[in-house]
Amino acid sequence: MKKSLGAATIAMPTPTWLVGTYDEDGKANIATIAWGGVCCSEPPAVAVSLRKSRYTYDAVIKRKAFTINVASEAYAAAADYAGIASGRNTDKFAAAGLTAVRSELVDAPYVAEFPLVLECRLLQTVEIGVHIQFIGEIVDVKADEDVLDADGNVDARKALPLIYSPSDRNYYGIGKLVGKGFDIGRKLLK
């Protein structure tokens, strides 16, 4: 039997993404978010949700761009730090020992040390409640060569993306491969 937990943000898992932006003075900043995901295939787009009170909010509005930096397990402490410190009075890149790289395609920095980066141009915003959802068109995806498989695809077992569980407020790594997508369910087709 299932037990009701009430209305809560307990979708599992959520990503551990660091949103990269420049503030109005051109200072690079990163903010960890878990409220995000792919929202469109054509054009390729992602959505991230931020509160208006967050430092990153104004940066996305003013620059009309952001990056999504996919943290690997090795950077769990840096990712957590970027979510609890404010960029208003801290250089989070320096404090976390990370390197800001200026995107050549959008007006936002990305994290050199992270294995996967999505460079995004702001398409639209949606006010939902306490959060504003930013929908960004993915202009380019950059991946470290050592996380690619033989076909040039990102291999999650090499990238080791960090995931977040809102229910217990913990970070986790990915588990074992359980099957090939668009394949293991074919036996159920009638």
Image: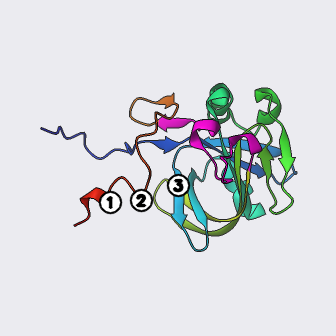
How far apart marks 1 and 2 lie (CA) works out to 7 Å
Residue at the spot of label 2 = 182
> Start and end of the magenta stretch?
143-164
Residue at the spot of label 1 = 186
Quadrant of residue 57 in the image? bottom right
Question: Per the image, is 161 magenta?
Answer: yes
The type of residue carrying mark 3 is Gly
- Observer-nearest of 55 and 123: 123
In this view, the residue farthest toward the left is 1
Q: Are marks 1 and 2 in contact (CB under 8 Å)?
A: yes
- Give the vertical position of 62 relative to 76 (above or below): below
How far apart marks 3 and 2 lie (CA) works out to 20 Å
Res. 74 visible in picture = yes
Taking the image as shown, residue 46 lies to the left or right of residue 118, namely left
Q: Position of residue 8 (x, y in %)?
A: 34, 44
Q: Position of residue 22 (x, y in %)?
A: 80, 51
Quadrant of residue 46 in the image? bottom right
